């Protein structure tokens, strides 16, 4: 009887629930560390709600903050935040499997399945090797980024602080977190003081894109290099969609939003805002001065986010691409969704529709609730909820002014956006198994 109970209990702990519980554990640990007096520059105990909000934002690599990272948190507190960003960006499961591998513990099939779900891998083979690849790729890119940022920050802040700033911003950018240490130049100012620095803009943008395309794509790059025809369908879709989502919004920003700025700064700002809106969270311009149409474009980019298996959040580029291709299939009256001479499975299309539905419902409902509670214009609230559920971190300046209820809503959205809507649904609802019988078919009218 006891053995039967153990088997049932073990079966109920699915991979999806392990992923959720691991993120919860990291958030709670980070919260209590940030509450310690050593974590703040004033050596005071940080309020639980503020510490929790910061821990959720860091673990979910979002970047929304209620306390300025540079001026409020001590070196220890900033280190805790950076550790949560790093673990949350690579994935708690990835770090856990790495520790198990280094310590010589056996990695079973259940661990491999959990890893597969956590990074949205198409199959479960080679998970241990993939874990090592993720760690190595992350460390190499972040170190290169830190070295490239070193001349800028060492010149402005001296060698010691410049070294810390370079490492912090490299990790924050690659993990698409959006946390910065520029508060000494102006609280919550992000990278606005570097809007004219083309070198820094390019480095940060490259780090954001590198983290946002996904580790599976990096594996394809390592394996096939310049032989693009050999790349997987997912990698091809990621590259094409990422290119479109960077250049088209950048053209709009250049000719509409930043046309009055000097040429180098206008070009920098146009591309930077286009790149950072898809979950990175840095900004080089005052977003509150952006037009309504510009804000709407930013919201759309925030909701889309990065790519599957990356450090970014959002609905993901592949989801939007599949939905677009599905619409094209309907318009052209074809039977199958196709791309690059490959057929996309029907269950993939259904999953994409479900993800879009969940994001839009939570995005609009949360924005309307916050608008009603705080008496703030709906567009401003939708910008905030889009930033939270897309794990972006951009804001129009209302985060610190929100009530506890609104902050709880934002924390829930950040957690949803990082862990993933389908992961939460699959963890909450039991699997019904395969259906051997099907109900009678009856057509209904659409459109």
Image: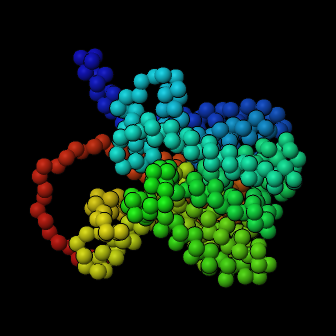
Horizontally, residue 415 falls left or right of residue 267, namely left
Please, is residue 36 above or below residue 60 in the view?
A: above
Q: Tell how many labels.
A: 0
In the image, residue 445 above or below residue 74: below
Residue at horizontal 36%, vertical 32%? 110
Q: Using the rendered view, name the quadrant where residue 85 is placed.
A: top right
Residue under the image location 80 percent in, 34 percent down: 44
Residue 254 is at least partly visible in this image: yes
Q: Residue at x 45, y 55 (%)?
A: 224
Horizontal and vertical percent for residue 51? 68, 40
Seen from the viewer's position, the closer of residues 40 and 374 is 40
Query: In front: 32, or 226?
Result: 226
Instruction: State whether residue 170 appears in this view.
Output: no
Q: Position of residue 164 (x, y in %)?
A: 78, 43
Q: Residue at x 67, y 79 (%)?
A: 254
Q: Is residue 233 left or right of residue 86?
A: left
322 relative to 48 in the view: left or right? left
Q: Position of residue 23 (x, y in %)?
A: 52, 39
- Quadrant where the N terminus sits is top left
Frontmost residue, 213 versus 75: 213
């Amino acid at each position: 009887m006891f053995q039967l109970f153990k088997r049932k209990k073990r079966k109920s702990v699915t991979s999806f629930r392990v992923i959720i519980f691991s993120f919860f554990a990291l958030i709670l640990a980070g919260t209590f560390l940030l509450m310690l007096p050593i974590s703040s520059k004033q050596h005071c105990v940080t309020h639980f709600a503020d510490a929790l909000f910061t821990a959720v934002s860091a673990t979910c690599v979002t970047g929304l903050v209620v306390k300025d990272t540079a001026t409020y948190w001590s070196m220890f507190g900033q280190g805790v935040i950076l550790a949560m960003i790093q673990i949350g960006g690579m994935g708690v499961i990835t770090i856990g499997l790495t520790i198990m591998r280094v310590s010589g513990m056996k990695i079973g099939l259940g661990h491999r399945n959990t890893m597969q779900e956590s990074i949205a891998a198409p199959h479960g083979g080679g998970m241990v090797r993939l874990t090592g690849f993720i760690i190595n790729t992350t460390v190499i890119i972040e170190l290169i980024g830190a070295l490239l940022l070193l001349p800028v920050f060492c010149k402005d802040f001296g060698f010691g602080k410049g070294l810390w700033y370079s490492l912090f911003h490299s990790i924050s950018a690659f993990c698409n977190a959006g946390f910065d240490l520029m508060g000494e130049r102006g609280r919550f100012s992000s990278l606005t003081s570097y809007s004219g620095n083309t070198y820094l803009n390019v480095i940060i943008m490259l780090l954001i894109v590198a983290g946002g395309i996904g580790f599976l794509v990096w594996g394809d790059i390592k394996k096939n290099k310049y032989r693009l025809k050999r790349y997987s369908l997912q990698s091809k879709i990621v590259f094409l969609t990422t290119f479109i989502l960077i250049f088209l919004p950048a053209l709009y920003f250049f000719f509409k939003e930043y046309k009055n700025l000097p040429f180098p700064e206008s070009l920098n700002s146009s591309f930077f805002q286009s790149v950072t809106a898809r979950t990175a969270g840095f900004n080089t311009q005052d977003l509150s001065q952006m037009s309504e149409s510009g804000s709407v474009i930013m919201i759309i980019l925030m909701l889309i986010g990065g790519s599957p298996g990356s450090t970014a959040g959002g609905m993901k580029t592949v989801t939007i691409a599949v939905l677009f291709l599905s619409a094209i299939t309907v318009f052209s009256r074809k039977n199958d969704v196709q791309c690059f001479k490959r057929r996309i499975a029907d269950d993939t299309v259904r999953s994409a529709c479900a993800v879009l539905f969940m994001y839009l419902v939570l995005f609009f409902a949360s924005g309307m609730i916050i608008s009603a509670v705080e008496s703030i214009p709906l567009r401003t609230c939708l910008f905030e909820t889009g930033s939270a559920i897309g794990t972006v971190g951009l804001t129009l300046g209302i985060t610190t002014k929100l009530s506890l209820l609104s902050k709880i809503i934002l924390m829930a959205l950040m957690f949803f956006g990082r862990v993933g809507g389908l992961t939460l649904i699959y963890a909450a609802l039991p699997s019904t198994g395969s259906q051997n019988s099907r109900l009678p078919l009856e057509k209904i009218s659409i459109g």
